[in-house]
Image: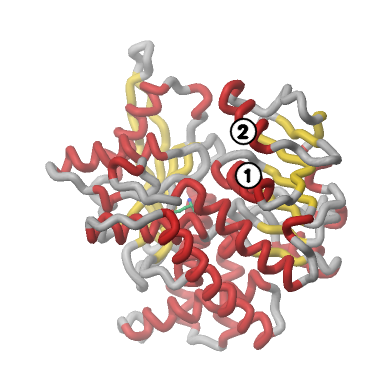
Amino acid sequence: MADSSLNPYLRAQQAFKEAVDTLGLEPAVYEILKQPLRSFEVAVPFIRDDGNLQVFNGYRVQHNDALGPTKGGLRFHTAVNMDEVKALAMWMSVKCALLGLPYGGAKGGIACDVDQLSDHELERLSREYIRAVSLVIGPDKDIPAPDVSTNPQIMAWMVDEYSRIRGENTFGLITGKPMVIGGSAGRVAATGRGLVFATKQLATELGIDFAKSQIAIQGFGNVGSVAADIAYAMGAKVLAISDKDGGLYNPSGINIPELLEYQRVHRFLTGFPGAEPISNEELLELPVDILFPAALENQITADNAGKIRARIVGEGANGPTTPEADRILFDKGIMVIPDVLGNSGGVTVSYFEWVQNQTRFYWSEDEVNRRLEEYMSRAMAEMHTMHERFGVTLRKAAYLVAVERIAQAMRYRGWLK
Ligand code: GLU
């Protein structure tokens, strides 16, 4: 059966609609939230190493700024397009509101293949992108951050470019920076750490001992690799893990520190001696306690949801599960930690980074991690209250918390009359 919900933008709209209806809010709330306030598509011309000029398509979408300036990552990936960026911006609105951050949602990116770019090309492209969007971003306007295939070095080039344009150091422009230029302790690990934190909490409620659990992880980027590392250190067994090149499986558990070292040297996971190859499909369908989809959207669909055998799906990626798949997992009794909570550790520590930039006072890693747990626990408690009050999935409950908060802000600000 084909899954009719693969377009993430339509899905995001539907989720907002359901939340507005369930809460019984005025229709104006949906009329405003159903599309981003501002969507920019920019041409990003840059010079390749061979001297030729190439123009890539760049995007920046600001969904809603009722709660504060907009916030969200920048993705460098061939599949980046306007509908995807709009959906990702809408999901950021939900994430920020759910976590109680003073931000609205945004997202951006460039349709490009980073594997085809040299470091110098990547730098020129990153700087040109900032030139193209410099008028619409800013520390009190819209604050970018890393996402798929972007990293602290790229954030550094970007904040440097913006600071040159402004003629002053503007570290608060962007988060996920290297620590020496205004980055926060704990930011790199924050998303993976938050995912493990939320999952451990739910596992305990379900009578699963996280430290003895078996885990499969799709993705070995900033989220998957950190979640694997932390889970391994806690005693859990990572039976399978993959990157965009292929997957690895070891029924007695993969040695994650050794795998991280292997990846540092070889860049990809394939060929790691401590495990055998596994396909992406097989990985998702393993009989484990916990499955972390931590790669891209639309991985668990109507086609494979029936075959998922994990007890908990903790979404590290944005939008990995389609609504039809969500229903199938629900009927099978599989608990899903929705992306807007599961991967919210990243933007939460981004918020801490921005606060530290604004105040010029930097916190210890312990302080950051302590506050991260505080913010995530509060959001989880609010999500649970809605889950029980309306008898809906955790995902829908998360939307209810978020939409209620955004609607309240819009009402006070006089946008709904
Ligand atoms: N790209 C991350 C996300 O999807 C982080 C965004 C941020 O830190 O602003 O949540």
Real-space Cα distance between discs 2 and 1?
8 Å
Q: Secondary structure at mark 1?
A: helix
Q: Position of residue 313 (x, y in %)?
A: 73, 58
Q: Say whether residue 341 is visible.
A: yes
Seen in the picture, residue 103 relative to 364 is either above or below; the reply is below
Residue occupying the point 61% across, 21% down: 266
Q: Give the residue type at disc 1.
A: Asp
Quadrant where the C terminus lies? bottom left
406 relative to 137, above or below: below
Q: Is residue 69 left or right of residue 382?
A: left
Q: Which residue is mark 1?
A: 229
**Residue type, mark 2 in image:** Leu
Position of residue 342 measured from the top left corner of the image (x, y, whole percent): 60, 60
How packed is label 2: few (under 14 Cα within 10 Å), some, or many (20 or more)? some
Residue 260 badge? 2
- The residue lying at 28 percent from left, 50 percent from top is 173
Q: Identify which residue, 192 or 321, lies in the foreground.
A: 192
Quadrant assignment, res 57 = top left
The residue nearer to you, when weighing 151 against 165, is 151
Which of marks 1 and 2 precedes in the sequence? 1
Q: How many marks?
A: 2
- Helix, strand or loop at mark 2: helix
- Image location (x, y in percent) of residue 32: 43, 73
- Tell me whether the residue at label 2 lies in contact with that at label 1, contact meaning CB atoms closer than 8 angstroms: yes
Left or right? Give the position of 289 relative to 31.
right
On whether ligand 1 comes within 8 Å of the CB at mark 1, the answer is no
Q: Residue furthest left?
A: 167
Q: Nearer the viewer, residue 328 or 21?
A: 328
